[in-house]
Amino acid sequence: MKISGSFLTIQEDPNKITKLNEVTDYMHFDVMDGKFTENPTLPFEKIIQNTIKVTNPKDIHLMVNDIKKYVDITSSINPDYITFHKEASKNILEDIKYIKDKNIKAGVAINPETDVNEIIDYLKDIDLVLVMSVHPGKGGQKFIDIEDKINKLTDYRNKNDLNYIVEVDGGINDQTINKVKNADLVVVGSFITNHEDFQKQVNKLKS
Ligand code: DX5
Ligand code: ZN
């Protein structure tokens, strides 16, 4: 299991972002338009400036309605993955292709109330499934138990010989991480960034 660091609550602090990069495997870029979610994130040009020292592979989480527009904007930083929300997409296959045509791996995210069956037909076409364990919008929320979805997605992958990775996002701490053991990539924000010693928090997650 790898950790993707979410810097949503420290997005204005380049030094802390660099510190988070040092203790995680991936960096998770939350991008919100203030339409799909209530509040927007900083403009992406500002996020680029604040993450200039990030060296980890980049995992972009688009919480936006206009998916292609934000794929164009965010693809400029050479991300490994760009993930969009099933609930925002008008044509899932078209959006997947739009990302893959830029030589970037494509992911689909589902909100806590969205069933895995709603994306089952697309699993053969994607590289990542992001299972939300909070409602998209802000860091530091309480974990919603989505353990069944993770297990269903990993079982389905193994039975059907598919290749996508399963990522989980929201409310992960040293307790809730035990509920998502089968996930490949775990997004963690405030459990790390609300404390002075980032490495100590990561050690707690790993033990
Ligand atoms: C929520 C975001 C998450 C969030 C994770 O809308 O997508 O990435 O920042 O932060 P924590 O770990 O604080 O829930
Ligand atoms: Zn996220």
Image: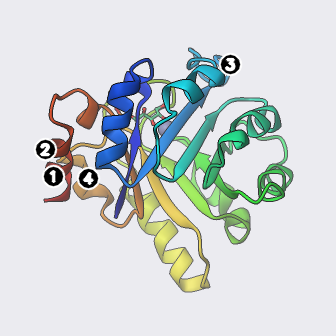
Residue 147 in the image: state x and y as whole percent. 36, 57
Residue 146 in the image: state x and y as whole percent. 40, 51
Which residue is denoted by mark 2 in the rendering? Answer: 200
- Of mark 3 and mark 1, the one earlier in the sequence is 3
Circle on res. 177 = 4
How far apart, in angstroms, are the residues tagged by discs 2 and 3?
A: 36 Å
Which residue is denoted by mark 1 in the rendering? Answer: 203
What's under tag 4, amino acid-wise?
Ile
Residue 80 in the image: state x and y as whole percent. 60, 55
Q: Are marks 4 and 1 in contact (CB under 8 Å)?
A: no
Secondary structure at numbered mark 2: helix
Front-most of 24 and 181? 24
Give the colouring mode of the picture: rainbow
- Of mark 2 and mark 4, the one earlier in the sequence is 4
Instruction: Tell which tag, 2 or 4, sits nearer the viewer.
Output: 2
| Quarter of the figure with the N terminus | bottom left
In the rendered view, tell whether residue 164 sits above or below residue 53.
below
What's under tag 1, amino acid-wise?
Asn
Please give the name of the residue rendered at 27% of the width and 31% of the height, measured from the top-left corner. 193
What's under tag 2, amino acid-wise?
Lys
